[in-house]
């Protein structure tokens, strides 16, 4: 199992600094955590670690290689339940993320449905939600298939956070050779799902894991909040049951990339040590 780190460790710092910190913490793998379409002032003036989807791939690889890092995924978390809009991260941006991943030699792009922001999105029926996601992912699937990229769905929404919801989406999309699952342990638990059951149900379709544990103070939000950015405790200190998930992944022969979404350098170090211990790596 490969253990990497998300590239949002230090607030108000550019991507170069994020990669430097990841290297200093002893990690050899990272993801492209945040990105945008076009250009942003924050990136231009060095206080945002966001990557333009229009970036020259060599510029990204240069700073990754300078810090001894291999990039394992491009995150393209979208809003697939609201109506399409130029102001909404959706189909167009996922396609760009797939093309950028291909140019970077990265095999995985991770997306999800996200939370709707409009009354239109909130009022969709279950069947309409499935159709909205299916329709918005058709072009990304075609691009991913053409460029041999694995497009992974992450628990981070009212459907993807549960086994039944994720299964309904996967069944509607087909393309099992192209579409897989990025298991987010904290998100699936928080949304009311069971991350251990994700492993048992989807098995080898899980191609990446985002690690985070949740403290017991989150219990009151379970099933009411769908997704959170990161955990604030070391893996194993919370209520998600991380060790059992690691052991279940080992049983199915999982050896792919994983990413720590844990705040605080000491929490990151302790989490990595425990993952390596539990997985025997």
Image (cartoon, rainbow, N blue to C red):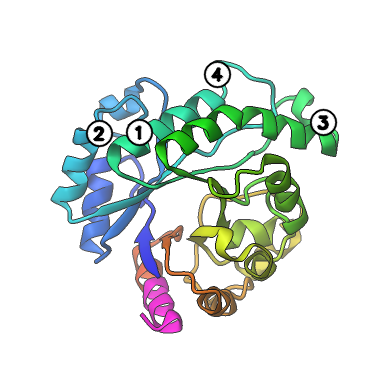
Label 4: how many Cα within 10 Å (few below 14, some 14–19, many 20+) = few
State the separation of the CA atoms marked 1 and 3.
Answer: 32 Å
Look at discs 2 and 3 and give the one toward the viewer: 2
User: Residue 32: image x %, image y %?
Assistant: 36, 44
Please report the residue visible at 24 percent of the width from the left and 38 percent of the height from the top: 60
What residue sits right under mark 1 in the picture?
A: 100
State the separation of the CA atoms marked 2 and 3.
Answer: 38 Å
Of labels 3 and 4, earlier in sequence is 4
Task: State the residue in front, 217 or 72.
Answer: 72
Of labels 4 and 2, earlier in sequence is 2
State the separation of the CA atoms marked 4 and 1.
Answer: 20 Å
State the separation of the CA atoms marked 3 and 4.
Answer: 20 Å
User: Residue 250: image x %, image y %?
Assistant: 50, 77
Of labels 4 and 1, earlier in sequence is 4
Task: State the residue in front, 166 or 192.
Answer: 166
Mark seen at residue 57 = 2
Look at discs 3 and 4 and give the one toward the viewer: 3
User: Residue 212: image x %, image y %?
Assistant: 52, 63
Label 3: how many Cα within 10 Å (few below 14, some 14–19, many 20+) = some
Give SS at disc 1. helix
Q: Is residue 190 above or below residue 73?
A: below
Q: Are marks 2 and 1 in contact (CB under 8 Å)?
A: yes
State the separation of the CA atoms marked 4 and 2.
Answer: 24 Å
Label 1: how many Cα within 10 Å (few below 14, some 14–19, many 20+) = many
User: In this view of the protein, can residue 150 be seen by the observer?
Assistant: yes
């Amino acid at each position: 199992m490969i253990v990497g780190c998300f590239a949002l460790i230090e607030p108000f710092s550019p991507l170069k600094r994020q990669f430097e910190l990841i290297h200093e913490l002893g990690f050899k793998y990272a993801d492209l955590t945040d990105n945008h379409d076009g250009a942003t002032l924050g990136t231009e003036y060095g206080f945002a670690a966001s990557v333009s989807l229009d970036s020259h791939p060599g510029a990204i690889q240069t700073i990754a290689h300078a810090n001894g890092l291999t990039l394992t995924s491009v995150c393209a978390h979208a809003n697939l339940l609201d109506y399409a809009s130029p102001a909404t991260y959706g189909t167009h941006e996922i396609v760009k993320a797939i093309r950028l991943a291909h140019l970077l030699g990265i095999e995985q792009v991770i997306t999800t449905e996200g939370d709707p922001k409009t009354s239109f999105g909130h009022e969709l029926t279950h069947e309409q939600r499935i159709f909205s996601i299916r329709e918005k992912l058709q072009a990304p699937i075609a691009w991913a298939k053409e460029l041999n990229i694995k497009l992974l769905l992450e628990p981070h929404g009212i459907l993807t956070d549960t086994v039944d919801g994720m299964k309904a989406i996967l069944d509607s999309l087909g393309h099992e050779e192209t579409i897989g699952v990025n298991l987010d342990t904290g998100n699936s638990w928080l949304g009311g799902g069971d991350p251990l059951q994700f492993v048992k149900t989807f098995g080898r379709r899980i191609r990446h894991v985002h690690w985070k544990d949740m403290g017991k103070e989150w219990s009151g939000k379970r099933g009411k909040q769908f997704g959170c950015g990161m955990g604030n405790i070391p893996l194993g200190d919370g209520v998600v049951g991380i060790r059992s998930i690691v052991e279940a992944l080992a049983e199915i022969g999982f050896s792919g990339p994983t990413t720590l979404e844990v705040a605080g350098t000491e929490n990151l170090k302790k989490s990595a040590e425990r993952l390596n211990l539990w997985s025997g790596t």
